[in-house]
Amino acid sequence: MVARLEELEVLRAQDEVVAATQRKELEAELAAEKEARAAEKRALRAELERANARAERVKEDFLKYPEFDFLLAKKAWGYFKDGFWGCLAQFRSNGYSEEEHPASFLNLQQALENLGDDEDAEDEEEEQEEGEVGDGTEANIPNSPKP
């Protein structure tokens, strides 16, 4: 029985040596893999920096390109040309209820007429203010001839 225990101890010691050796091999393999991944990461970062620098140069060149101004003006004209009417169409197509929320600016003709009425009212107020004197009497101010 003692011999059997000694034999088991020897086998266990051998297994521990084999396990320690395998552990060291795996740790070395892991360290090598980590180093390889770190090197790959550095290479990818360098490549990314080069790509970003190139993209920045290409962007600057594009902005200096003579046709860019033409394209920009064309796009801007599209917004100005269809801007108000396009906005109005979207406003109406998205279910805006004019009955619940009347918006006078949606009726361009009515808005222009109201604008004219506002200007007339302002002119009348200015004339009244000019015609009044400090004690409430009206002064006779001659009208200047209109060209």
Image (tube, rainbow, N blue to C red):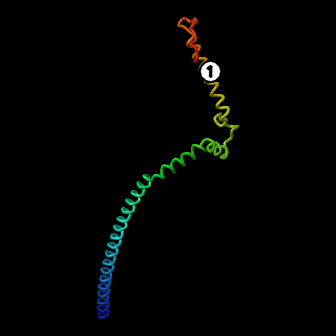
Which quadrant does the C terminus fall into? top right
> 113 and 29: which one is in front?
113
Is residue 32 left or right of 77 when viewed as pictured? Answer: left
Measuring from the top left, give residue 83's x and y in whole percent. 59, 43
Query: Disc 1 residue type?
Result: Ala
> 6 and 105: which one is in front?
105
| Relative height, residue 67 to residue 120 (above, below) | below
Measuring from the top left, give residue 144's x and y in whole percent. 56, 13
Is residue 78 left or right of 44 when viewed as pictured? Answer: right
| Relative height, residue 44 to residue 119 (above, below) | below
Quarter of image, res 52: bottom left
Measuring from the top left, give residue 100's x and y in whole percent. 69, 37
Residue furthest to the right in view is 99
Is residue 11 left or right of 102 when viewed as pictured? Answer: left
**Which residue lies at the image location 44% right of the left edge and 53% below the top edge?**
65
In the picture of the structure, the residue carrying the numbered disc 1 is 121
**Which structural element holds mark 1?**
helix
Quarter of image, res 143: top right
**Which residue lies at the image location 35% right of the left edge and 68% below the top edge?**
43
